[in-house]
Structure formats: C-alpha cells, structure tokens
Amino acid sequence: MSDIFPKWTNRLPLKIAIGAVLIGGALTAGTTYYFTPKYTRVGYQPIQPISFSHEIHAAQLGIDCRYCHNGVEKSWYSNIPAASTCMNCHNQVAKDSPKLELVRESALNGKLISWVQVHKTPDYVYFNHSVHVNRGVSCVKCHGQVNHAEEVRHEKPLSMTFCLECHRDPAKHLRDPKDVYNLDLKISDVEQEKMGTKFVHDWKVNASQNCSACHR
Amino acid sequence: MRYFLLGFVLLCVLVVSVAGFRGSTSRKPPIEVFPDMDRQLKLRPQTDASFFEDGRSSRLHVPGTVARGSHFEGTPFNTGLIPGTTNGVDVIPVPVTRQMMQRGQERFQISCLPCHGALGDGNGITKKYGMAVVANLHDARIVKLPDGEIFNVITYGRGLMGAYGSNVTVEDRWAIIAYVRALQRSRLASVNDVPAEMQSMFKK
C-alpha cells in the first residue's frame, strides 16, 4: 500500500498552491501593469513630419498656446494651426530653413501636413476642451509640460480613472483662468486647496461623474 | 519545484526586459487592448479622409456659402468698411466698454505681442530672430489710420504681415483695435490730459 503514492506527493498540494499563487499573481500584476493606459499610452512620442519644437516657440519665445491652438477655448477640439499661421512668422524668420520645406509648400498650394495626433480618446468618449480650460483646468494637468517639449510626448494616461480622479475632487486642480496657459506656474498644496475650494464654490463647478457626461 | 521557480523567475525577467517599464518612450501608436468601439466610422477633425478628394476631414469653406453662426452681412461691423465703398470706417461701430477693453488687451497679448511687442512699438521677441520690419503701432501714419482700416489689416494682413482673420474673431478684432487705440493714446497724452488737481505732480 505504502508504495502507491510516494512520499513526495505529500507536499504536492502545497507546491501546486504556491505555483498557482505565483502564476496568478504574476498574471494579475502583469495585466494591470502592462494592459492599462499608463503603460500603453504614456511615453508615446511619434515622429512628426516637421520637427516642431514647443520649447522654442512656447517657452523661449513665450507665444501663448492660443496663438496657435486658437480653438481651445471655443470648441471641444483644440486645433493644430494651419500652415498660414506658421508662415506669418516664417515668411521672415528662418525663411529658407530646410526644416520648414513642408510648411512653405502647404501654405503655397494647400498640401496637407500630416501631423501625427498624439492624444486621442476612443471615439465613444465625449471630451471637450473649452469646458475645462474656461473653468481653470490648465493644459499641464492633462498634457504635462508640453511647453518644454522638443517633441510632444503622451505624458498622462488619459484613462477613465484619470478623468474621474479629477472629476471627484476638482478643487485640487482648479486655478485662476488667467493662469491656465501658464504651464510653469507652481502652486503649493495649501494654497491650491484654498483657491480650489473657493473656485468650486463660487463658480458652482459640477464636474459630472454620470456615465452620460462622457459617454453620450 | 526548483525548476519551476527558476523558470518562473526567468519568465518574469524575460517579460520585463522585452516589455520594459511604464512611461518609456515609444514611436509606435499605442496598443488598444479592447479595440471594440475605439475607432468608429466617423470623421474626426483634421485627419486624413480618403473619402474626399483633397483628403481633408475638416472641410474648407465652399465659396458662396455661409457657415452657421458666422457673420455674413456686409455691415461695417463685419467688414470694417463704409457700405458701398472700400474705405474703412472711422471709428469702431460698437460701443466700447471696459469689458471689451480688457478682452482687447488679452487678445492683443495673444495674437499681436510676439511681433509688435507688449507696448505696440514693434519690438516683439521675434525681432531678435530676424523679423526685421515690424510696424511700430505708434507711428503717426498708423495712429491716423481709420479703425476700419486696421480691421482689414488684421483680417487680410498687409505687406509682410500675414492675415489673422481666421485666428481672431470679428468681435475680438474690434476689441484689439480699441486696445491698440488705448496704447497709442498712452504715448500721445500730454500733461493737459491729467486731471487739473494732479497736474502739479508732473510739472517741476
């Protein structure tokens, strides 16, 4: 009788249990780590047709975001500027630069510049820039420090959790609307709390958590 | 068991070394894990659309049509011109309010400041980088330009200045003009513009 199950089988259940826990744990950890937007999106930095630098234009020259992205306060979509907007300066500045070949061509005969879109919510999500920027949510909250980017990079996950974290408690993020375009502004936590609470109260901010706000 | 543990550790190392960490730079478009309805058959603005011949999903203005909500009547407010002529109207065709002035300041600082400078004297930041001929808005000739003329400079550009008609709305153009006039006035003012009881402060 004693030979049917050798002695090592006594420890088998324990080993199977440990194995299952390890594999299960690794699968769960791996999935949350690798299959969520924090991994899949953050860090996306496509190669653009023109090496346009926000560092030069926004930080060094101090051009306001709205000089180029002039739809951001008015519509859901923050437009990429037309070639004519670039040419307003580049007809005199660096006007023969080979890097601007495509811009000149586009301004001349209307050829499209195929900028690669970096931030892109799924089509079943309704997002709107104007509600946010006109209520004191700065670009930096959702795009990171674009103004210092040589190339635009996807800095924030823009997942549903990300949106909801703010919608649950906007006071931690709101600032004076005139500072929305100042991406370098540093606000201490205490001051933020005070200011944010005041804005939420004064403007009756209601950042909806209803599914139908973002999925319409 | 030993082999299992070894294999397990190796597998983990392998996965991490192939897949890397969060936030590492990638040139490839993000993977959409459950792509079910992520991309639908609708056109997003400013994307390539092979449906149209010119490939633009944002359609250009069709000649002879007017977009909803946009201005179209040939009134001085919309064109800056005296009806039936090509002359600019002399003064802003709407009442100037404090609010409008503040709006004008904000818009001036967004759209005009890079070239004309905060003071409107033509010393914007771009001058350092080769923008040689930017007009000084305090120039006597420009001070005398009718408001409607400046409206048309903003809308269609002039000489080396490009058009801002598509970047600055009609209302904002008038607001900017009001602010430009205030800037000009600030340079042209004399002691006599100061209230009488305060004039002594400026006279030595």
Image (tube, coloured by chain):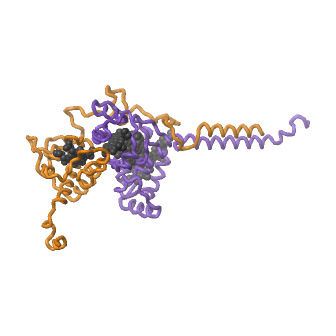
Closer to the camera in the image, A173 or B183? B183
**What chain is the orange one?**
B
Give coordinates of residue B137: x percent, y percent.
19, 51
Give coordinates of residue B87: x percent, y percent.
10, 43
Q: Which residue does the image show at 46% across and 42% down from the upper left? A: A153
Give coordinates of residue A34: x percent, y percent.
57, 41
Q: Which residue does the image show at 49% across and 36% down from the upper left? A: B27
- In the rendered view of the protein, which quadrant contains the C terminus of chain B? bottom left
Instruction: Return the residue found at the far left.
Output: B84
Q: How many marks?
A: 0
Instruction: Return the residue found at the far right.
Output: A1
Q: Is residue A88 left or right of residue B3?
A: left
Looking at the image, can residue A70 be seen? Answer: no
Q: Which residue does the image show at 29% across and 44% down from the upper left? A: B130
Looking at the image, can residue B112 be seen? Answer: yes
Give coordinates of residue B12: x percent, y percent.
66, 40
Quadrant hosting residue B48? top left
Quadrant hosting residue A171? bottom left
Quadrant hosting residue A17? top right
- In the rendered view of the protein, which quadrant contains the N terminus of chain B? top right
**What chain is the purple one?**
A
Instruction: Return the residue found at the far top.
Output: B53
Q: Is residue A10 left or right of residue B94?
A: right
Closer to the camera in the image, B61 or A15? B61
Q: Which residue does the image show at 46% across and 35% down from the upper left? A: B37
